[in-house]
Amino acid sequence: MPVHNADIAAIFEQIAELLEIQGANPFRVRAYHNAARTVSEFGREFTALIAAGQDVPHLPGIGKDLSGKIHEIATTGRCALLDRLRGELPPALTELLVIPGLGPKRVRTLHEALGVDTVAQLRAAAEAGHIRRVPGFGAKTEQRILDHLRSRPGPETRMLLPVAAQYAEALADWLRGAPQVQQLEIAGSYRRRRETVGDIDILVASDAPAPVMQRFTGYDEVRQILGQGSTRASVVLASSLQVDLRVVEPAAFGAALHYFTGSRAHNIAIRKRAQARGLKINEYGVFRGKARVAGETEESVFAAVDLPWIAPELREDRGEIAWAARAPLPRLIERADLKGDLHCHSRASDGNATLEELAAAARAAGLTYLAITEHSQRLTVAHGLDTARLLQQCEAIDALNARLDGIVLLKGIEVDILEDGQLDLSDEVLGQLDIVIGAVHSHFDLSPARQLKRLMRAMDHPHLHVLAHPGCRELGKRPPIELDWLRLVRHARRRGCFLELNAQPKRLDLTDVHARMAREEGVLVAISSDAHTVDDFNNLDYGIGQARRGWLEAADVLNTRPLDTLREVLRRG
Ligand code: DGT
Ligand code: CA
Ligand code: CA
């Protein structure tokens, strides 16, 4: 069974979490978290490199021990350390870590005091009132745990887009190896660049479906065949990802592509439009009576209902059809429009690359400026910078800029926004920086009114330029903070502040809906990698996907400006 980078990363994540629950050295824990990230973002498959006789390449933050483990996992699919840790602690304990208020220490305490090893046992213990009696816990904590467990949706089965991409693209490449495949697209939510996908929908145009179907079900990662007919099949891969395949004749490819790209709501709206014109649209084409009048390309399908082609990211039935019918759609932003990046971390806080390595990687990613924005002192777990260390870094950046070619580093900070909206560093030091981004890293559950007041107060600060990851969510882990978004966006507009679209795949925050609100209210959005490693600039692709879902054009985005314009924009009055 081939091992993908996402599988190696998942093993490293598990190791980090189990070590954390055991109370291991935090540096060791962080090394595994960082390694997971580096591995999942590395551009090539380790399995393929090793199969080609190459060594595991040198990567920042990956020493001899870790690269040995990459080799071990890539060649055997297992890791002896993880097996050992699983023998020492019940692996289901890591599922408790996502519950608000339960850090590794408390998870261990519950395990030792009450024998709680699973979410179900946790719930039973809370309902029986046992948790409040454990030293360090109280009735309030117990209630919080219960509230969370009762309100949370069923088991999360959606996969982050970039994780799904690794499995889906490998399978698509495998299918393209069949000479009978004339065209192939991955459709569904994947093509619409949703932040998570429920399953993968692959569409193939071919005059000879049988060998294509055979090749699909014969893929070596197929764990289970859910159903199989002559032109369609559904399978579950070893990664638990479900994949649906549909093979159609080339003359119907555009109609089928439109149909399987969705969304369902968009399709229904298009079908209605067709009916009003005496046409019928389905996955086989556009029909007037029995005659097929369109369907070979997506353009022909849209044209049949008097519309221009609509980009997949917009197909959510959020007004795109009515808009396209009367005016040109926005020219959606593309990756090449980004001139720089306004959020990253070096080794000085919780990243794992040097300033120089980050600069080189950003330049290689086609960027011309990069703001270094470490965490501030309050965030001790991330080695946040105090004034002295920040000023020291500013000197280092000046010195480095004198030597750098083709890229300029900006002096910045990701300053913590405290519970009352104050910032974690003095005005005096913040005023010396090129860019200040402010972020919430604590007190996520304030009432909506207090949360809004807190963020508006932070934006009132004369030196704050950008509000970073405004919703503070982590997909599948932490819901967004609650507040009146329209008031927040309008306050940003009044104060001349910008809103970040953090492009880390697990954040993608602003959401698509709020990015569009920012555009409509005239607030520029900063699409930022939040890079912690040199490979994190790949995040920008996913940020662009989210921005396109938010209808953003290049002009709506702060970091499409060249550096001199950016500096002017940042010098707000
Ligand atoms: P997902 O997989 O939950 O992330 O979301 P999708 O959008 O990929 O949904 P999926 O996989 O159930 O179906 C793929 C596309 O096929 C969907 O976006 C629209 C189309 N489709 C599927 N079933 C229906 C249906 O009953 N009616 C219509 N109009 N379209 C459908
Ligand atoms: Ca799907
Ligand atoms: Ca599907």
Image: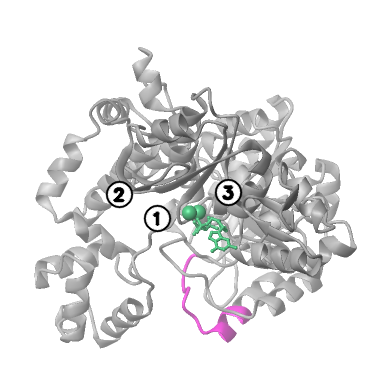
Q: Does the magenta stretch include residue 450?
A: yes
Disc 2 marks a residue whose amino acid type is Pro
| Residue 570 percent coordinates (x, y) | 79, 55
Q: Is residue 501 magenta?
A: no
Check disc 1 and report the residue beneath it.
Answer: 381
Q: Is residue 504 left or right of residue 410?
A: left
Mark 2 in CB contact with mark 1 (< 8 angstroms): yes
Range of the magenta residues?
441-453
- Point out the image quarter for the C terminus: bottom right
Name the quadrant containing residue 65: top left
| Residue 409 percent coordinates (x, y) | 68, 38
Mark 1 in CB contact with mark 3 (< 8 angstroms): no
Depth check, front residue: 206 or 418: 206
Residue 51 appearing in the image = yes
Check disc 2 and report the residue beneath it.
Answer: 26
Marks 1/3: CA–CA distance: 17 Å
Marks 3/2: CA–CA distance: 23 Å
Mark 3 in CB contact with mark 2 (< 8 angstroms): no
Is residue 28 depicted above or below 553 in this figure? above
Disc 1 marks a residue whose amino acid type is Val
Check disc 3 and report the residue beneath it.
Answer: 390
Depth check, front residue: 260 or 194: 260
- Point out the image quarter for the N terminus: top left
Q: Residue 22 carries which label?
A: none
Numbered disc 1: secondary structure? helix
Circle nearer the N terminus (1, 3): 1
Task: Estimate how packed mark 1 is, as few (under 14), some (14 to 19) or many (20 or more) residues with alpha carbons within 10 Å.
Answer: few
Furthest residue in direction top, as rendered = 53
Is residue 121 depicted above or below 534 in this figure? below
